Image (cartoon, rainbow, N blue to C red):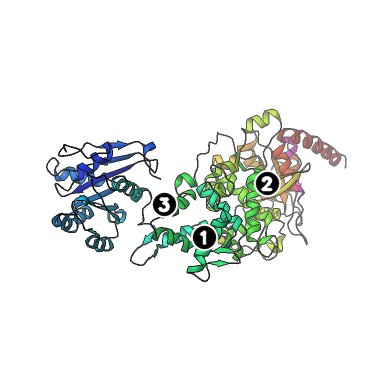
Amino acid sequence: MRKDVRILLVGEPKVGKTSLIMSLVSEEFPDEVPPRAEEITIPADVTPERVPTHIVDYSEAEQSDEQLFQEISKANVICIVYAVNNKKSIERVTSHWIPLIADRTDKDSRVPLILVGNKSDLVEHSSMDTILPIMNQYSEIETCVECSAKTLKNISELFYYAQKAVLHPTGPLYCPEEKEMKAACVKALTRIFKVSDMDNDGLLSDLELNFFQRTCFNTPLAPQALEDVKNVVRRNMADGVQDNGLTLKGFHFLHTLFIQRGRHETTWTVLRRFGYDDDLELTQEYLFPPLKIPPDCTTELNHNAYLFLQSVFDKHDKDRDCALSPDELKDLFSVFPYMPWGPDVNNTVCTNEQGWITYQGYLSQWTLTTYLDVQRCLEYLGYLGYPILCEQESQAAALTVTRNKRIDLQKKQTQRNVFLCNVFGARGSGKSGFLQGFLGRNLMRQKIRHEHKSYYAISTAYVYGQEKYLLLHEVLPDTDFLSETDLSCDVVCLLYDVSNPRSFEFCARLYKNHFMDSRTPCLLVGAKADLPEVRQQYSLSPLDFCRKHKLPAPQRFTCNTAEAPSRDIYTKLTTKAMYPSSFSYLWMALSLLLMHVFASC
């Protein structure tokens, strides 16, 4: 909602513009009226909407056209004042003032107008018969009101309507010619309905309606009031209530009725509670709440966030197969303005035999988004209605910012649950297969279209009974230039093809150029271990290289298996990421023992 409201009064001379302002302020008709009232500001605590309001007068005798144009451009709402006993002042509303204002305002954001008939105390009749056709002709006219500065009739109402026209405008919500809500309003209310329909049965039950009422208006509906609302819908449409629950059509009907009866502030209260601005777009403040992330810290979902995401999954997994079919996934993301997950996601997380994202894969993708792009995670949680459904100030409450990694190293323990492993290797060494193997896919299940390829894979691994997420990132083999992102991770996997004599050299050079003097733990992996191993064309064998640089002995891996590939290597990588120091000592001791055994043989 706007932080303040600026009201401009225009009209022909002597229609009583200045008198209206002075009567409002002093609560009595002034004995002497100056040519023009000074701008006044009404404090927020004395206005019905609790918003500071600036009221600006216009005098043709004291101001130039240029000054008038400037005031029109600054105004949030303009009151065109006419005298009910002066036909010429009424005619000038359409012949002069409305065209003038239209010429001086942006066509895409027309300023709302209020038609004000002053001096109603001087006539017996009403001017409404003349004014209503004008109101129907111009959609920018919010309302019209007759008043009297002398008797104070409708003075406070006039300025309340003006305030309301700015804070709760009809224009974005409703088309008077068609007598129905505009498409953008229908779209926003449809999203609100779907977010509020917590069991996804297409109906708002009494429990869901009460939660909705309490969320938007801070008060529940009494059982009889709830029944009265549904009865109004029943009387007006056949399919507005089903199984004692409010349908989407019924929900739309209620808001149409609110607007038609001049209670559009009710609809605006709902829209703003769910994050919408005056243009019926979700605000940046709602989608991207402030979140401070110090250097060398990462972002993770907390326990409450996972519980929320689990409830969203359960809501849309209608067949209860612990996987989301394409239709179920489309339904889940129907509250988004776009489809956030492309086909590459199916190659990033675990799927079932049909290629559908499983429950574990679903949570993994959310974990990945939170780790790699926290702003996008905040945006997505906003679309799902996290702060509303979880009754939090913002979706930032769903996140945990981990402590600095240097503190973890000093204390030799970590509280983190997500670890990043960058996977390096020459072209054709088997990096993509290594990533897909982590998702339980053997070579036969790794037929991926190039445009659907993912350079990430994420799943869980258990380390000493604790479930952790390991995020694998395939780094393109360009040793001439590695970015800070390529080098910044929790553990490095150096992958080479045991059947290619030139494959290991890439890993050796990469390690010596970038990781030999770093504190990032490294693990050498010989991929395609099902193939005959050949001698590597490098000065040292992989085993001797590891011994020289005090690295763990090379690990063998293959995804050419009948079942899912072994997960041992992924557990070892996760353990190295969690305990970089202690793991290194343990593996060094084991490696030296193995090397001694080999030497003896």
Question: Residue 389 got which mark?
Answer: none
Q: Specify the segment rendered in magenta.
A: 546-568
Alpha-carbon span between mark 1 and mark 2: 51 Å
Q: Are marks 3 and 2 in contact (CB under 8 Å)?
A: no
| Secondary structure character of the magenta stretch overall | loop
The mark lying in front, picked from 1 and 2, is: 1
Which residue lies at the image location 47% right of the left edge and 52% below the top edge? 270
| Residue 408 painted magenta | no
Foreground residue among 290 and 257: 257
Where's residue 337, x and y in %? Answer: 48, 57
Alpha-carbon span between mark 1 and mark 3: 17 Å
User: For mark 2, what is the residue?
Assistant: 470
For disc 2, the neighbor class at 10 Å (few under 14, some 14 to 19, many from 20) is many
Q: Residue furthest bottom?
A: 238
The three-letter amino acid code for the residue at tag 2 is Leu
The three-letter amino acid code for the residue at tag 1 is Val
Secondary structure of residue under mark 2 = strand
Secondary structure of residue under mark 1 = helix
Looking at the image, tell me whether mark 1 or mark 2 is earlier in sequence order. Answer: 1
Q: Residue furthest right?
A: 601
Looking at the image, tell me whether mark 3 or mark 2 is earlier in sequence order. Answer: 3
Vertical arrangement, residue 191 with respect to residue 491, above or below: below
The three-letter amino acid code for the residue at tag 3 is Glu
Q: Residue furthest left?
A: 61
Q: Are marks 1 and 2 in contact (CB under 8 Å)?
A: no
Q: Going by the image, does 124 lie left or right of 212?
A: left
Residue 161 visible, this angle: yes
Question: Residue 229 got which mark?
Answer: 1
User: For mark 3, what is the residue?
Assistant: 265
Secondary structure of residue under mark 3 = helix
